[in-house]
Image (cartoon, grey):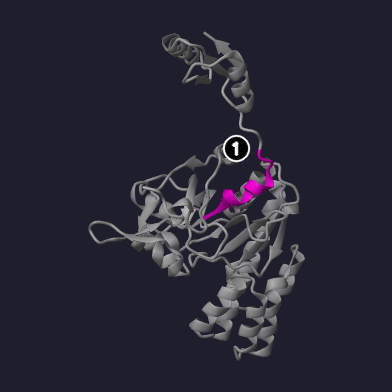
Amino acid sequence: MLRTNLGLRIPKGMRDLLPEEISVQEGLEERILELFKQWSYQKVLTPTLEYSACVQPDVEQEDSLYKFFDREGHILTLRPELTIPIARLVSTRMRGGEFPLRLCYGADVYRNSNVRHREFRQVGVELVGSDQELADAEVIALAVEAMAGLGLKNYQFNLGHMGIFAGLMLETGIEKELQAKLEEVLARKDMVGVESCVRQSGLPERVQELLLRLPHFRGGEEILDEVLGWSEQPAIQHAVESLRKIYQYLEDFGVQANVSLDLGILRGFSYYTGAVFEGYVPGIGFPVVEGGRYDDLYADFGVPQPATGFAIHLGNLLEQFPIPVVEGADILVYGSDAKEIIRRCRELRAQGKRVEMSLGVLGDEKAKSMALQKSIKEILRV
């Protein structure tokens, strides 16, 4: 049956990857995962489908999930990220593990939102079982090293802390509905929305000015001293001192020059509780690295553990790298005797050669032309 026009297209936000594009993506992923391995992170993999009961409570916008029903009537969801599924995994099959656990992954995730890509590859790490600032510094330093290891130039990381915004909200006693709206527009860096929301909030003038400054308040360690003067709220004081320790550790790791403090960062998943960070590369107007601390998530699975981690949106980085010509087979075997062609191909493959077998009778000129078009290095007539 002839396919309709819709049958010739792919769903919005999805994409096909050609052999040369897959070659680049797999090469990048292999390099990153090898780096993770050097830092003692071990790879895990969770199912593409999870029960919605696992991921839904921690997703800001429920309609961003792809949902299905199974035969038993349970609601299933395509994983929107890996942090929550790994929390489930650790809390069940790895429950008796020796903490801290260092885990990493490379997998596709799916988000039904108004972004360019709704299916994309992520590689990332989760460091589970340590509440130390040194753990935060480790994952940030690892993220920076990953960008450097890919040969990217002029990348930049921004580091903030959820406790500063949370502390301001506690001090004002703001209603939860307004707080959620403020958090949403700040996380999206919607400056018009921030201005509108703050000016209509009825908050004290001083708090309004601080909230309006947050999206633009970035720099080095010197900005933390100013923040200490904003409030004596313990949440803010703790956040500032935590950021100071992390930032100083980053100097020890040799990556501080690539990291700026940015107090306007708020992450889009509700589980983040502490230090949060983003990584940018020139030419892409959104973060290609996102991460932070999430100390409350594991308690939801019955195994309370502090944790921190990050994800690299690998699919969004493909355009930063030249697409090479895909390397063809090592040798093309051709001739007129199919039995002999098969025998010779088997011999060569047993020697570790990548072999393309002629499926019909080829002449010498046709074989040379085919090898040239397919980037095959050698031809063998039998």
Spot occupied by residue 27 in the image (x, y as percentages of width and height): 59, 37
Spot occupied by residue 369 in the image (x, y as percentages of width and height): 62, 22
Q: Nearer the viewer, residue 310 or 181?
A: 181
Residue most toward the left? 72
Q: Nearer the viewer, residue 170 or 70?
A: 70
Spot occupied by residue 262 in the image (x, y as percentages of width and height): 69, 66
Q: Considering the numbered disc 1 on the image, is that residue within a helix, a strand or a loop?
A: helix
> For residue 216: magenta?
no
Q: Is residue 85 left or right of residue 164?
A: left
Q: Nearer the viewer, residue 36 or 229?
A: 36
> Relative to 108, does residue 221 appear above or below in the rendering?
below
Q: Residues within 10 Å of mark 1 (few under 14, many from 20)?
A: some
> Relative to 350, does residue 232 appear above or below in the rendering?
below
Q: Residue at x 60, y 49 (%)?
A: 138
Q: Residue at x 74, y 63 (%)?
A: 221
Spot occupied by residue 286 in the image (x, y as percentages of width and height): 64, 60
Query: Dot 1 corresponds to which residue?
Result: 20
Q: Nearer the viewer, residue 214 or 27?
A: 27
> For residue 314: magenta?
yes
> Relative to 50, does residue 94 appear above or below in the rendering?
above
> Would you identify the image quadrant in which residue 55 lies?
bottom left
Q: Residue at x 71, y 77 (%)?
A: 213
Report whether residue 104 is seen.
no
Question: Disc 1 residue type?
Answer: Glu
Report whether residue 143 is seen.
yes
> Would you identify the image quadrant in which residue 276 lies?
bottom right
Q: Residue at x 60, y 91 (%)?
A: 202
Please give the range of residues in magenta. Answer: 308-323
